[in-house]
């Protein structure tokens, strides 16, 4: 008898909507705090570990808005004494040459002394220092960053699992890493229930969710791998809740990528995320190092680039992005104002209560009754 494979229906942000609650609350009353380990931020937003949006000075600006910046410990900040020059060279490259320019820029060796220097520069701004490392360099650079004062490690690869086949004698083991450093360790990226459970069982403190949804990422096009963010978040949130019920330990999840508007931020939280990680919206801020450009961490891969530089333009300040006043009507500014308004509509006093909001399949949510906005009236 033939066993036919059946496709599971999965959903992205444009295919769902949040149903209003039976009780509403005043948006000024809601609490949007996010905590992982001993690090707490006023708003549930982390900045992607992309060089275009993660310099020491930008970390300070993010902290002033109540958010958390994550610096790429293997990017230009630790390869160059004057990293802004490298960022500007990438931004100025022609579309035809930008991939080769990035590959050359990122071929410069990482300098261990710059790890300590950048961490201390971030700490001088008063911000929490969160740094991102790939698994291959975590055991080497992670302890150096923590010794210099880093408050959090984010171990990131395109796809992360607790079990990894490798030709090396022994790869990165999360329990071993947790013994080496005494700071919260976030791990990413993951999109499935079983893998999320296994990663949480290693003892890590937070999990990043998402493969390939970012505006500057081409993983889905290059490899065909990815799961839309609403389904990925809901599956990993269920893993978090089941793990909490069995262990008593709560491991927050962060939806990473694909979030551009306040509505998408709200849908990520309602899907079960404790926070979100964004990149391109930050790249559009006046304060961003790359002045209107963005590119992913996998963009300069020497053999298989899985990202591209995108021209996203400069739209406003970080304060406008998070708190307004909004100068546009498309939902890309005042993200936290939108989140608070949504929490009020569903009756959620905090992010955890937002997880109980009803989500419905709604493929026409952006087009229903919008003929004039779409130029069809």
Image (tube, rainbow, N blue to C red):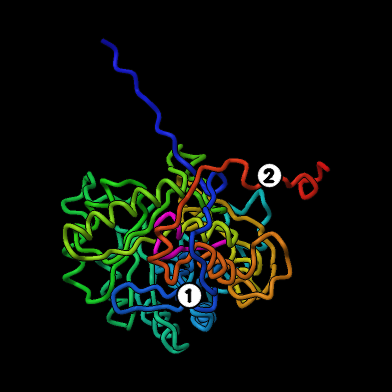
Decide: is 306 above or below 107. Answer: above
Decide: is 112 above or below 264. Answer: below
Q: Quadrant of the N terminus?
A: top left
- Residue 68 appears in the rendering: no
- Residue 276 appears in the rendering: yes
**Residue tagged 1:** 30
Mark 1 element type: loop
Residue at left 60%, top 55%? 309
Mark 2 element type: loop
Outermost residue toward the right?
A: 377
Residue at left 68%, top 44%? 367
Residue 332 x %, y %: 64, 63
Q: Quadrant of the C terminus?
A: top right
Residue at left 50%, top 46%? 360
Q: Which one is in front, 220 or 44?
A: 44
- Please identify the quarter of the rendering in which residue 136 is found: bottom left
**Mark in the foreground, 2 or 1:** 1
How far apart are labels 2 and 1 at the CA level?
A: 30 Å
Q: Which mark is residue 367?
A: 2
Magenta-tinted stretch: 269-280
Circle 2 Cα neighbour tier, 10 Å, few/some/many (<14 / 14–19 / ≥20): few
């Amino acid at each position: 008898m033939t066993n036919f494979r059946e496709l599971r229906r999965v959903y992205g942000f444009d295919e769902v909507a949040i149903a209003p609650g039976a009780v509403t609350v005043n948006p000024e009353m809601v609490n949007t705090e996010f905590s992982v380990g001993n690090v707490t931020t006023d708003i549930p937003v982390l900045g992607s570990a992309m060089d275009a949006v993660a310099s020491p000075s930008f970390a300070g600006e993010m902290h002033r808005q109540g958010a958390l910046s994550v610096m790429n410990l293997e990017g230009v900040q630790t390869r160059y004494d004057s990293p802004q020059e490298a960022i500007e060279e990438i931004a100025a490259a022609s579309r035809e040459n930008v991939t080769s320019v990035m590959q050359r820029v990122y071929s410069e060796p990482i300098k261990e002394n710059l790890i300590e220097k950048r961490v201390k520069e971030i700490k001088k701004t008063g911000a929490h220092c969160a740094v991102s490392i790939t698994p291959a360099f975590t055991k080497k650079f992670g302890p150096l960053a923590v010794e210099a004062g880093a408050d959090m490690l984010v171990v990131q690869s395109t796809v992360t699992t607790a079990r990894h086949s490798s030709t090396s004698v022994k790869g990165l083991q999360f329990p071993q890493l947790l013994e080496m450093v005494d700071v919260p360790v976030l791990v990413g990226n993951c999109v499935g229930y079983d893998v999320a459970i296994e990663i949480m069982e290693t003892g890590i403190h937070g999990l990043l969710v998402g493969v390939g949804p970012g505006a500057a990422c081409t993983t889905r096009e290059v490899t065909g791998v990815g799961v839309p963010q609403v389904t990925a978040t809901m599956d990993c949130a269920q893993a978090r809740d089941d793990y909490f019920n069995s262990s008593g330990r709560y491991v927050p999840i962060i939806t990473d990528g694909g979030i551009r508007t306040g509505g998408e931020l709200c849908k990520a939280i309602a899907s079960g995320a404790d926070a979100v990680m964004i990149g391109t919206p930050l790249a559009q801020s006046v304060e961003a190092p790359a002045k209107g450009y963005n590119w992913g961490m996998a963009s300069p891969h020497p053999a298989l680039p899985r990202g591209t530089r995108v021209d996203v333009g400069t739209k406003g300040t970080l304060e406008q992005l998070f708190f307004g006043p909004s100068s546009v009507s498309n939902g890309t500014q005042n993200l936290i104002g939108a989140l608070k308004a949504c929490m009020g509509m569903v009756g959620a006093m905090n992010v955890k209560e937002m997880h109980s909001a009803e989500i419905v399949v709604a493929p026409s949510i952006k087009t229903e009754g919008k003929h004039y906005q779409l130029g069809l009236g």
